[in-house]
């Protein structure tokens, strides 16, 4: 594995660790703080810019008692300063006394800025069982 690929996969893993631990500070460190960042949670409209994206994660974290996220990476591609990771998210969520298992197909796009990779786009689409 190339160093560049390892760095992208480490950034992707940091995103899912922040997600699973419901850690908004760690999530903030992974995302680009720019206005061009995009996030599409399953079944929701597009959010543009870090501030609305942050609020959405804070709401998810606040409403969720417990999270487990397993990922199955399908593809990782790197083109100059842009990288994308295509994967399946396997999520176990406990919220409001209910346990919900879900699967999503996700695309995470990272941009290299100042020699680090930052998430600039996350799109999750539910998979039907």
Image (cartoon, rainbow, N blue to C red):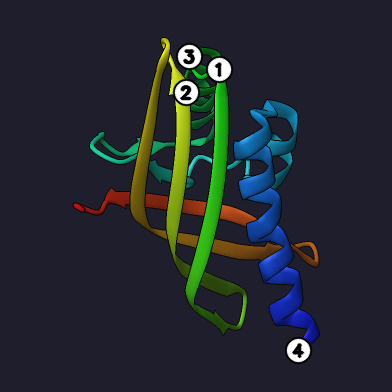
Q: Earlier in the sequence, mark 2 or mark 4?
A: 4
Q: Which of the two discs, 4 and 1, sits closer to the camera? A: 1
Dot 2 surroundings within 10 Å: few (below 14), some, or many (20 or more)?
some
Dot 4 surroundings within 10 Å: few (below 14), some, or many (20 or more)?
few
How far is the residue under mark 3 from the one under mark 4? 39 Å
Extreme residue toward the bottom, this view: 1
Q: In the picture shown, does residue 127 fall above or below 54?
A: below
Tell me if label 1 and label 2 are in contact, CB under 8 Å: yes
Q: Quadrant of the N terminus?
A: bottom right
Instruction: Report x, y in % for residue 3.
Output: 80, 83
Q: Earlier in the sequence, mark 3 or mark 4?
A: 4
Q: Which of the two discs, 1 and 3, sits closer to the camera? A: 1
Q: Earlier in the sequence, mark 4 or mark 1?
A: 4
Give the residue pinned by disc 2. Answer: 94
Tell me if label 3 and label 4 are in contact, CB under 8 Å: no
Instruction: Report x, y in % for residue 13.
Output: 67, 57
Q: Secondary structure at mark 4?
A: loop
Give the residue pinned by disc 1. Answer: 65
Q: Which of the two discs, 2 and 4, sits closer to the camera? A: 2
Give the residue pinned by disc 4. Answer: 2
Instruction: Report x, y in % for residue 109.
Output: 50, 62
């Amino acid at each position: 594995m190339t160093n560049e690929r390892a760095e992208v996969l480490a950034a992707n893993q940091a995103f899912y660790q922040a997600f699973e631990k419901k850690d908004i500070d760690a999530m903030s460190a992974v995302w680009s703080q720019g206005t061009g960042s995009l996030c599409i949670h399953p079944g929701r409209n597009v959010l543009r810019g870090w501030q609305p994206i942050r609020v959405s994660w804070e709401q998810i974290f606040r409403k969720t008692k417990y999270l487990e996220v397993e990922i199955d990476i399908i593809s990782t591609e790197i083109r100059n300063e842009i990288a994308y990771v295509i994967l399946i998210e396997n999520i176990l969520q406990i919220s409001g006394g209910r346990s919900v298992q879900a699967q999503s197909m996700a695309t995470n796009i990272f941009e290299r800025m100042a020699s680090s990779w930052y998430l600039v786009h996350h799109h999750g689409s539910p998979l039907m069982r």
